[in-house]
Image: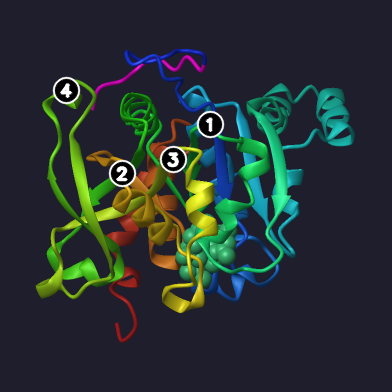
């Protein structure tokens, strides 16, 4: 994947501006992670020593976006506190001369300008994104789902922002799944993209999306990843979207309205590492991978992990 300079004021070859704002819808009920998420937002679950949401905001800022709108809901306002200053704690750490922890505590508040708004009822992802309209206006913007992120040194967002500035349309991201697993994801039907975008990354043109198809009915094995770059006209499409699957206002349906009206829809096929923290298995895999790669913890953790995997204890119940 090609890397692009992360300059928020950069304009692409077409003269269209790149998106400079991100929206993180994080008002969902997180039922797949209950009961942990009964009182703690899943976006605040720690991956080693940082909440998931910090990795996501870092992904946005690394792509040159420093204006982030968090869509929150009931019981989820603690997410916002993580990006606030903590003068009492900072003073204590300063007193102790613990400069490392002081920097770690200050970092989230220095990452980006964080704005919030509330989705009063959880009526779907499209409905949640609709609340961003007054903050975003008619400009393009990125949407980053709050339970998924990609590896820092294999970025995805810069290429998506560049592609959206060139097409002016909707830009999605896909990752390849095992064909037997299509029923867990939104799956795309695609055709080759125009050659003019081939310098950006692996780009495809999207001809349709199917929600959780059986393997024999799936049009491909390309699954939707939780990153979108959308034009401002998505808000009008959301207003015209009827409740769909599960009675929710689906973002996919709003994007389909735009596609049917002639808005180009493209996607980048992401071949880097994606972490899915929205359910226990993916979360555990994320924690292990990131801990194993950390310079400070990695060597000791990897040594323990190898011993554990080779021990009887790792064989599971019945051993
Ligand atoms: P999910 O489908 O993952 O739903 O939503 P969820 O509630 O987070 O989790 P499960 O499936 O019940 O375990 C995708 C994203 O959209 C947000 C969620 O917070 C998540 O980041 N969302 C979803 C909203 O903000 N509002 C909604 O009404 C629905």
Q: Mark 1 points at which residue?
A: 139
Task: Decide if residue 304 is in sight here.
Answer: no
The residue lying at 48 percent from left, 42 percent from top is 233
Q: Is residue 88 positioned above or below 274 on the image?
A: above
Looking at the rendered structure, the secondary structure element under dot 2 is strand
Q: Is residue 316 positioned above or below 46 on the image?
A: below
Looking at the rendered structure, the secondary structure element under dot 4 is helix
Residue in front for this viewpoint, 247 or 25: 247
Q: Name the residue under label 4.
A: 196
Please tell me how crowded label 1 is: few (under 14), some (14-19), or many (20+) other residues with Cα within 10 Å: some
Extent of the magenta region: 1-8
Mark 3 or mark 1: whose residue is earlier in sequence: 1
Cα separation, mark 3 vs mark 1, equals 9 Å
Q: In the image, which is nearer the foreground, mark 2 or mark 4?
A: 4
- Quarter of the picture holding the C terminus: bottom left
Verify CB contact (< 8 Å) between mark 4 and mark 1. no
Q: In which quarter of the image is residue 180?
A: bottom left
Q: Mark 2 points at which residue?
A: 173
Is the CB of mark 2 within 8 Å of ligand 1?
no
Mark 4 or mark 1: whose residue is earlier in sequence: 1
Verify CB contact (< 8 Å) between mark 3 and mark 1. no
Mark 2 or mark 4: whose residue is earlier in sequence: 2
Where does residue 73 sit, x and y in percent of width and height? 70, 61
The residue lying at 38 percent from left, 58 percent from top is 252
Looking at the rendered structure, the secondary structure element under dot 1 is loop
Cα separation, mark 2 vs mark 3, equals 12 Å
In reply to whether residue 3 is colored magenta, the answer given is yes
């Amino acid at each position: 994947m090609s890397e692009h300079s992360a300059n928020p004021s950069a304009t692409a070859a077409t003269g269209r501006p790149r998106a400079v704002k991100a929206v993180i819808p994080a008002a969902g009920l997180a039922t797949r992670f209950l009961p942990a998420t009964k009182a703690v937002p899943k976006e605040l679950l720690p991956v080693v020593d940082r909440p998931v949401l910090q990795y996501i905001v870092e992904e946005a800022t690394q792509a040159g976006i420093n204006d982030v709108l968090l869509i929150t809901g009931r019981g989820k306002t603690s997410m916002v506190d993580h990006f606030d200053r903590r003068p009492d704690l900072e003073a204590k750490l300063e007193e102790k001369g613990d400069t490392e922890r002081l920097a770690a505590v200050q970092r989230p508040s220095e990452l980006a300008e964080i704005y919030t708004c509330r989705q009063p009822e959880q009526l779907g992802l499209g409905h949640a994104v609709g609340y961003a309209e007054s903050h975003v206006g008619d400009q393009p913007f990125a949407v980053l789902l709050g339970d998924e992120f990609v590896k820092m040194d294999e970025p995805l967002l810069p290429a998506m922002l560049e592609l959206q500035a060139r097409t002016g349309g909707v830009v999605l991201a896909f990752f390849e799944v095992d064909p037997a697993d299509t029923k867990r994801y939104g799956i795309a039907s695609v055709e080759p993209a125009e050659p003019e975008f081939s310098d950006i990354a692996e780009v495809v043109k999207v001809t349709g999306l199917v929600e959780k198809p059986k393997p024999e009915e799936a049009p491909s094995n390309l699954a939707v990843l939780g990153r979108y770059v959308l034009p401002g006209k998505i808000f009008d499409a959301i207003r015209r979207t009827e409740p769909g699957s599960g009675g929710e206002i689906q973002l996919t349906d709003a994007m389909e309205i735009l596609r049917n009206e002639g808005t180009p829809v493209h996607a980048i096929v992401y071949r880097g590492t994606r972490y899915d923290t929205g359910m226990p298995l993916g979360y555990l895999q994320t924690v292990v991978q990131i801990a194993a790669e950390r310079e400070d913890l990695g060597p000791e953790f990897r040594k323990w992990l190898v011993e554990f995997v080779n021990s009887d204890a790792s064989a599971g119940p019945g051993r």
